[in-house]
Amino acid sequence: MKEFSYIHVERYFAAEIKHDSIALIDDNMSLRVITTEEDFIYNKIVSNIEEIKVRKGKVITIITEGDDKLKEYLDEIIYVPKTLDILSPIINTIQLSYLCSS
């Protein structure tokens, strides 16, 4: 994304955001988050989204269809179908390419 948009972009794993970059989040920052129910760290990701919203960050997320637990925290939602764990990265990558092009 950095190379074709000329926008500074950083990538963090869900478990790392609270220990490093959380202090940099403010109302000018937009974060893209993959939050599919198949993910084994789903609860950590939910906790991170709550922390981001407390700091007034904008959350754009890829989420499994039917998962309404997070709606109140999300600014924009892209739904993906529920699938096998092994297929989830493929479906999420397709949606991420959509996010990068918009």
Image (cartoon, rainbow, N blue to C red):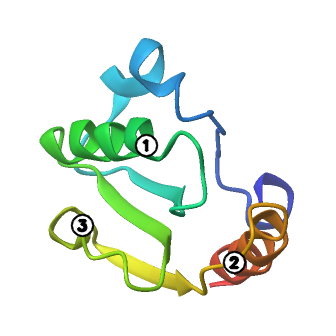
Measured Cα–Cα span from mark 1 to mark 2: 19 Å
Residue position marked by numbered label 2 in the rendering: 83
Q: How many numbered marks, from 0 up?
A: 3
Could you tell me the amino acid type at mark 1?
Ile
Q: Residues within 10 Å of mark 3 (few under 14, many from 20)?
A: few
Q: Position of residue 9 (x, y in %)?
A: 65, 46
Could you tell me the amino acid type at mark 2?
Thr
Q: Which numbered circle lies on residue 101? A: none
Question: In the structure shown, which secondary structural element does the residue marked by tag 1 occupy?
Answer: helix
Left or right? Give the position of 9 relative to 88: left
Residue position marked by numbered label 1 in the rendering: 45
The nearer-to-camera label among 2 and 3 is 2
Q: Position of residue 49 (x, y in %)?
A: 32, 47
Measured Cα–Cα span from mark 2 to mark 3: 18 Å
Q: From this viewpoint, which residue is outermost toward the top?
A: 19
Give the answer, above or below, for where 54 lies relative to 35: above
Residue position marked by numbered label 3 in the rendering: 69
Label located before the other in sequence (2 or 3) = 3
Question: In the structure shown, which secondary structural element does the residue marked by tag 3 occupy?
Answer: loop
The nearer-to-camera label among 1 and 2 is 2
Q: Position of residue 52 (x, y in %)?
A: 28, 42
Could you tell me the amino acid type at mark 3?
Lys
Tag 1 and tag 3, C-beta contact below 8 Å: no
Question: In the structure shown, which secondary structural element does the residue marked by tag 2 occupy?
Answer: loop
